[in-house]
Image (cartoon, helix red, strand yellow):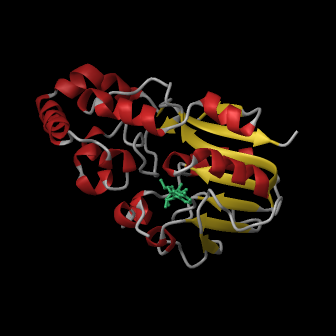
Amino acid sequence: MTVLYDTIGRGYGALRRPDQRIKRRLFDALGDASSVINVGAGAGSYEPNDRPVVAVDRSLTMIQQRGRKAAPVIQARAESLPFSDGTFAAAMAILTIHHWSNLSFGLRELRRVARERVVILTRDPAASSFWLTEYFPELIEVDQQTFPSMATLEQELGPIDVYTLPIPHDCRDGFTGAYWRRPAAYLDRRIRSAMSTFTKLNRLQPGLDRLRQDLSSGAWQKKYGGVLKQAEMPLGYRLVVSASQ
Ligand SMILES: C[S@@+](CC[C@H](N)C(=O)[O-])C[C@H]1O[C@@H](n2cnc3c(N)ncnc32)[C@H](O)[C@@H]1O
């Protein structure tokens, strides 16, 4: 079966490298959980290496990009995890739940296989957007259609704690918001290729042309130059933690 990341996932590992500041926040959220399942694990970013971890991903292209020292991996779907109840202390799902074909089933599976806690990194579609949407207004709609609301997550998981995750200006992990202080990066096809959101836009070229023009005329700097002084930006990314009562 061909899945999205079999197509867009090539070269992913080189562009979506773990960012240490995000990693620290994730590890805090995982706490002292003695074993972890990483669902939608991709190339293995953010997997702890101080305790047993098992990774799951549905895309072979992504699995093949895992390093030699990465945790053992199983090709499977989040919606149907091949583990019995409570096999792991914790489950983590990093920037993946918006790709699942059945969110409810996937979240139920995370709760089922994790005894203590579920830790999710996602984007809150209700959060305000940043300057990129001036050039690609479709991003707002795509985000709203793609990412579940915090209320939906609470409905599915029960009580959750939601933490804001500001994105550092030099974030190493090249997801869509990562280059908010490096605007020219969005003109680079290779960089965009690791951002699934861009594959969903119907009108890409007009936005690219305008951004290129505004950067070379100084119009971008005039309007948005203020962001260049900021060290981090709250772009709507959230750490969601569901702990067993
Ligand atoms: C944006 S990548 C994130 C990968 C990794 N968690 C990271 O932070 O780098 C999304 C991943 O979710 C995987 N994925 C998408 N749908 C899935 C599903 N239903 N079950 C398991 N993995 C899935 C994709 O193959 C891809 O590797």
Quadrant of the image containing the C terminus: top right
The location of residue 26, given as percent across then percent down, is 66, 47
Residue, x 75% and y 49% (percent of image)?
A: 111
Q: Which residue extends farthest right?
A: 245
> Is residue 31 visible in the rendered structure shown here?
no
Indicate left or right for 127 with 113 as reference.
Answer: left
The location of residue 35, given as percent across then percent down, is 79, 62
In the displayed structure, 28 sits above or below 221; it is: below
Q: Which of 77 and 168 is in front in this view?
A: 77
Q: Which residue extends farthest bottom?
A: 68
Residue, x 76% and y 35% (percent of image)?
A: 158
Q: Which residue extends farthest top?
A: 223
> Is residue 52 visible in the rendered structure shown here?
yes
Image-quadrant location for residue 142: top left
The location of residue 127, given as percent across then percent down, is 49, 25
Indicate left or right for 92 with 90 as reference.
Answer: left
Q: Which of 58 and 205 is in front in this view?
A: 58
In the displayed structure, 8 sits above or below 96; it is: below
Residue, x 52% and y 63% (percent of image)?
A: 42
Quadrant of the image containing the N terminus: bottom left
Residue, x 42% and y 63% (percent of image)?
A: 3
